[in-house]
Image (cartoon, rainbow, N blue to C red):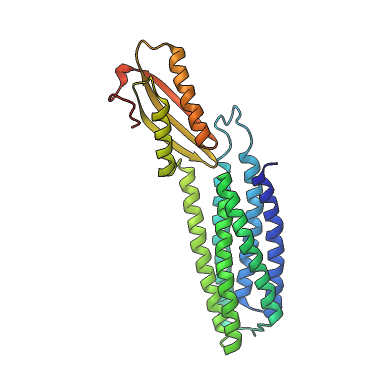
Amino acid sequence: MNQSSRIALINVGISILVLSLKYVAYLLTGSIALYSDALESIVNVATAATAVLALRVSHKPADAAHPYGYAKAEYFSAVVVGVLIVVAAISIFREVYLGWFSPTSLDASLPGLAVNAGATAINAIWFAVLLRTGRRARSPALIADARHLLTDVISSAGVLVGVAIAAFTGWERLDLILAGLVALNILWSGWSVLKESIDGLMDHAVPPETLALIRRRIAAEATGAIEAHDLRTRQAGRMTFVDFHLVVPGDMAVSEAHAICDRIEDALEAEVPDVLVNIHVEPEAKAKQHGIPVI
């Protein structure tokens, strides 16, 4: 089992622990805002479990049915995360609506607030671990989970302060207003995750800095060729796909052209993790300009 899969499994356990703590905090206080905080943690559990499945599928080797592999499975996981976040926000809005017309007493006891604060601290620490691992492994599923967790931490901190103020001032509807704000924040988080996931499914190009690196490595290793053109890149989860046309002299032996291609592929594989390179070799009549420009 790779590190990403291990972290995803641990994430499920931590999500269940945090959900339990936040629900206890809600029971101790009767706060709709803390209930909304607990409801968001239910989403965390569901998305963590989805990420485990997505990571397992994404690391399956390529086969005849999927010759480019299963890396995009992680984007589907991130889409599920976004949808579940939106569902959680709608559920919170429902509780706010019902509570506004049928208010209940609020007991912002110190034990209840302390339990919620402990759960928030656990999420804050775990967010840092998830984000670092997700970026290192280039995992959309783990990064989506981490970003949602950060939203959870920020909203939880705001809710804690607000519930304490509501209890101190006696303005119990502040609790409902806070819950509504949490729901709006969750909606924004869900939209961001959905947008990035759909963008990934649409074969988005690599970031500009990675593209610049790829261009430099091709130009540096293409000695003997006339030019490289029509460079295209796309990102699929942790995988990066690169393809371009390499123009060589018409009288160059196939073995020499192949050696240039091998040189370029080795250089790119050393610089870009999980890269797959496809080079189309063309005769000099296909050149668009001279030198070794990468266009």
Instruction: State the image coordinates of residue 222 (x, y, percent, origin top left).
Output: 40, 24
Q: Quadrant of residue 39?
A: bottom right
In the figure, 258 relative to 277: above or below? above
**Farthest left residue?**
289
Q: Residue at x 54, y 82 (%)?
A: 174
For the point 66% across and 77% down, which residue is it?
113
Apparent side of residue 136 relative to residue 284 in the rendered image (left or right): right
Question: Which quarter shows the C terminus?
Answer: top left
x and y, in percent, of residue 165 in the image? 57, 84
Horizontal relation, residue 53 to residue 165: left or right: right
Q: Number of labelled discs?
A: 0
The quarter of the rendered structure image containing the N terminus is top right
Does residue 277 sit above or below 237 in this rendering? Answer: above
Seen in the picture, residue 231 relative to 190 is either above or below; the reply is: above
Name the one closer to the observer, 215 or 246: 215
Question: Which image quarter: residue 221?
Answer: top left
Q: Position of residue 12 (x, y in %)?
A: 69, 55
Viewer-proximal residue among 180 and 116: 116
What residue is shown at x 58% (from left), y 37% (from top)? 70
- Residue 212 lies, with reference to residue 278, above or below; the image says below
In this rendered view, identify the residue nearer to me: 177 or 226.
226
Q: In the image, what residue occupies the spot 65% across and 62% down?
A: 42
